[in-house]
Amino acid sequence: MTVKKRIAAMMMTTICLGLLAACGTNEVNEPQQTANTATDKPLQTETTEQTNEPEPEPEPEQTDAAEGPYTVLAEELRAPWVIAFDEEALYISEREGNIVKLDGTQMTRQSVHLTKSVHGVGEGGFLGFLLSPDFAQTKLAYAYHTYEAKGQIWNRVVLIKQEGDEWNEVKALVEEIPGAANHDGGRMAIGPDKLLYVTTGDAQQRELAQNLNSLAGKILRITLDGKIPADNPFPNSYVYSYGHRNPQGLVWNEEGILYNTEHGPSGTPGGHDEINVIEAGGNYGWPTIYGDATAEGMIAPIYHTGEEAIAPSGAALDANNRILLATLRGGALYRFDPAINEMTVVFEGEGRLRDVKINDGRVYVITNNTDGRGNPSKTDDRLLLLNDVN
């Protein structure tokens, strides 16, 4: 049974357990906390093979589609980060180093065994997760996680494989991407060219964003087996674009145009979160320009939020080529229409939102209230199927 059929069956359920209670400075200016306040389990604990054993999960509560704006598909997630769809199930990465599988109403937390332990400080941890295009046959997926080596924080891209109810590292594709407590990037997407795109933050060293010899503050372009594509804009480099502060969502429209969402500066002035059109070899200006500023050889955003900070995270493209943005500081799902340069709120009231995906025309979001910066309810964090996003 496909995910669409399973969700349709769940939405016909006549038992309603009620809507859950609704669960700040820019994203990076808020105090760093390391405890998952919904479960009282630390996010900071470095995840290893010994500490990430799968454990049984209760069946999720659901709202009646006719009585609320969403259906709850999963709850008690631990600082979830990415939603990934398979035909038969969906998967969610958690920052402490697990992957949650939802198959119908059955939710299983699966352990991940890596050769380097997950380092879950601040905004780091087990972040990006992306199923391989041939996942049904190979059970392979891509993961992006923070780790510590020789007294420094780094990020890496690895290939992992599902084996039963656990995942094992197959090989590292890119290592020693500069990391820090904040600004770690971590989004991954496969483009129309069948190549892997990866966002990296400036690792709180803003000068690295302009340094083409560093992988920090960039969008990387990689072959699916970890090589440098021959037509990348800079010779012998994974770098596709640079001058980024903390790039997040990656989406392509039907014409193959790549958009990204990005966190603007914190402090004074703050805000200026961005939407950019990404070009091969493009310099997006950080830290030299942001907002309405311009400079020769640098590309300004097509939209920015002014002094308001919304901290955009995951993004998705709808059937009308409009971009949906899950936002953390903004606490809402926004929709940006490039045709008219307009941003509107289409869903709010459930706290911080980390990711949004569209599957079979249906819109899914995950809350992120247990990341140490939100106000979690007893059942946070949750995966929600939105019933009406026009």
Image (cartoon, helix red, strand yellow):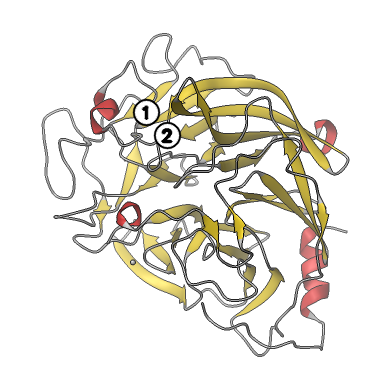
Answer left or right for 390 relative to 84.
Answer: left
Q: Can residue 195 be seen from the camera position used here?
A: no
Q: Residue at x 63, y 27 (%)?
A: 116
| Residue at the spot of label 2 | 200
Mark 2: give few (<14), some (14-19) or many (20+) Cα within 10 Å: many
Q: Residue at x 75, y 35 (%)?
A: 49
**Could you say which is closer to the camera, residue 148 or residue 253?**
148
**Could you say which is closer to the camera, residue 219 or residue 80?**
80
Answer left or right for 139 relative to 254.
Answer: right
Which amino acid type corresponds to the residue marked 2 in the rendered image? Thr
Counting from the top left corner in percent of width and height, residue 322 is at: 44, 59
**Could you say which is closer to the camera, residue 145 or residue 131?**
145
In space, the residues marked 2 and 1 are separated at their CA atoms by 6 Å
Q: Residue at x 65, y 33 (%)?
A: 142
In the image, which disc is placed on residue 340?
Answer: none
Residue 9 location, quadrant = bottom right
Which amino acid type corresponds to the residue marked 1 in the rendered image? Ala
- Of helix, strand and loop, which one carries label 2? loop
- Of helix, strand and loop, which one carries label 1? loop
User: Against 250, is 5 above or below?
Assistant: below
| Residue at the spot of label 1 | 216
Task: Pick the quarter of the image with the N terminus.
Answer: bottom right
Q: Residue at x 75, y 88 (%)?
A: 16
Asked if disc 2 and disc 1 are in contact, CB closer than 8 Å, the reply is yes
